[in-house]
Image (cartoon, rainbow, N blue to C red):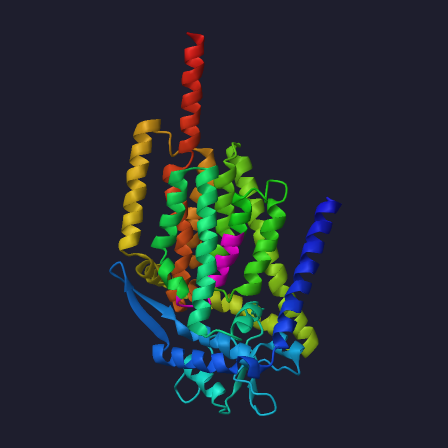
Amino acid sequence: MKKVISRYIVAYVFFILIGFISLYIASRIPTDAIREKSVESSKILTEQTEKVRFNFLEKELYADNSSDAIMLNIIYSMDYNNPLESIMLCRRNYIPNYTTEYLADVNGHLPFENGHFSMVEEYHNLLEGKKQISYEYGRYWHGYIPIIKVLLLNFNITQIRNIIFGVVVFLLIILLILIYRNVGFMQAVAVLFAFIAADLVVWNKELHGIFPMLVGLFTSVLIASGLITKKNINLMLFINGGLVAFYDLLTTPLVGFLMPIVIYYLVNNEDKKWYIMIRDLAINGINCLLGYFAIWITKWFLTDVLFGTDIMGVSIEQIFYRTGIQRADDKMKAISKALKLNYDKAVGTATYALVTFGCIAGIINTIKYGDKFFVDVKKIPYYICLVLPVIWIMLVVNHSTIHHFFTYKNVIIMELSFLLITCDNKQKVKEEKTVYKIDEKEEK
């Protein structure tokens, strides 16, 4: 037990050190070095406006430029001469030795001036050198800063999106190959289908939601390759949860959390008692959440201690705000609205095709392998992951309502789980039947 605890402590300390070092190095990159590509990026975002609307398979989609503008604004606002302050407070609209008005991280909606509020316009004004109120955004780590700031040395926002999306596609291809080799063709098709139905095409048009996907895919590849096994899966999930907290702005954390867990049970295909399966799955989830909150709370605590802020208090209030607890009287109505908004965004032609594909596969497998095909202990992780995104929407109802245009992407976990329920264990069933036939021949 002591060895296990010591490993977690070492992983935690190492994580914090690497995170700090990467952010510090990024903060020491002079703003002038990224100015050219920052100006290009601002022009691109201004032309596209706050929301980029387009159609995919008869479904109207839109990418969110507002969050990307915030991210670029924070990166450009970093003070080369005060790296620690820049890392911990994460200000936007900040020009060193020029900005005079500051507002601390606030609760509820982000503040606005003169009845007009545009993150893209704020970013443009910052690059124009206009004096604005500077807002702190210290409740998050903003771990994306080192990656994007280094890329801004040579690339604009569109090119950076394409580069990171290229990494996502590369990891997805590797994952599909590993699943095809180690599990089966239908399971690989299920994973691919889930990504397509979850609007994969949007991921290369915005940056803020792609990092949980990157984390989830990276960990999933490690699991599918066999590098992560039963012996170290929980420690890896602890690290995985920390990575989601470090990179994400509370966009689609379930993608980062649950994708590796689903892939782990798909690849390992363990035969256990139902209560042991649920116990192990709960332990997996706890480890992921432990890493997530450990890294997040560390940011709040260090910021408060070093700069006398109240990020810890703000973040706790944010929990109440995001969950909508303060609106308890209208809770059911709020939940219904959040579910409908996310459902409307998620459902489209690709979703209908996915459901149809899954239902057909389920019917065929039921005919082939009997009416107990869906009653399988090995499917428990998929059944649980199937409903967790719905529970998440109900839990953070306020957040899921305000930001439904990106929270709906957690549906990829539902779609993936649904498809794996319809095709899981087919390979093993075939193997068992083959072995049975061979044995039968030998007896004759």
- Can the viewer see residue 209 in this picture? no
Where residue 384 appears, as percent x and y from the top left, is 45, 45
For residue 58, above or below residue 42? above
Q: Quadrant of residue 379?
A: top left
Residue at x 44% of width, y 46% of height:
176
Where residue 88 appears, as percent x and y from the top left, is 63, 74
Depth check: give the residue in front, 229 or 106: 229
Residue 89 left/right relative to 60? right
Looking at this rendering, what residue extends furthest in the right direction?
2
Q: Quadrant of the N terminus?
A: top right
Residue at x 46% of width, y 65% of height:
163
- Main SS category, magenta section: helix
Residue at x 38% of width, y 58% of height:
200
Residue range corresponding to the magenta coloring: 205-218
- Can the viewer see residue 177 in this picture? yes
Q: Quadrant of residue 136?
A: bottom right
Depth check: give the residue in front, 102 or 200: 200
Where residue 202 appears, as percent x and y from the top left, is 37, 63
Task: Tally the marks.
Answer: 0
Looking at this rendering, what residue extends furthest in the front direction?
154
Looking at this rendering, what residue extends furthest in the top direction?
444
For residue 431, above or below residue 417? above
Residue at x 31% of width, y 70% of height:
53
Residue 421 lies in the magenta stretch: no
Looking at this rendering, what residue extends furthest in the left direction?
58
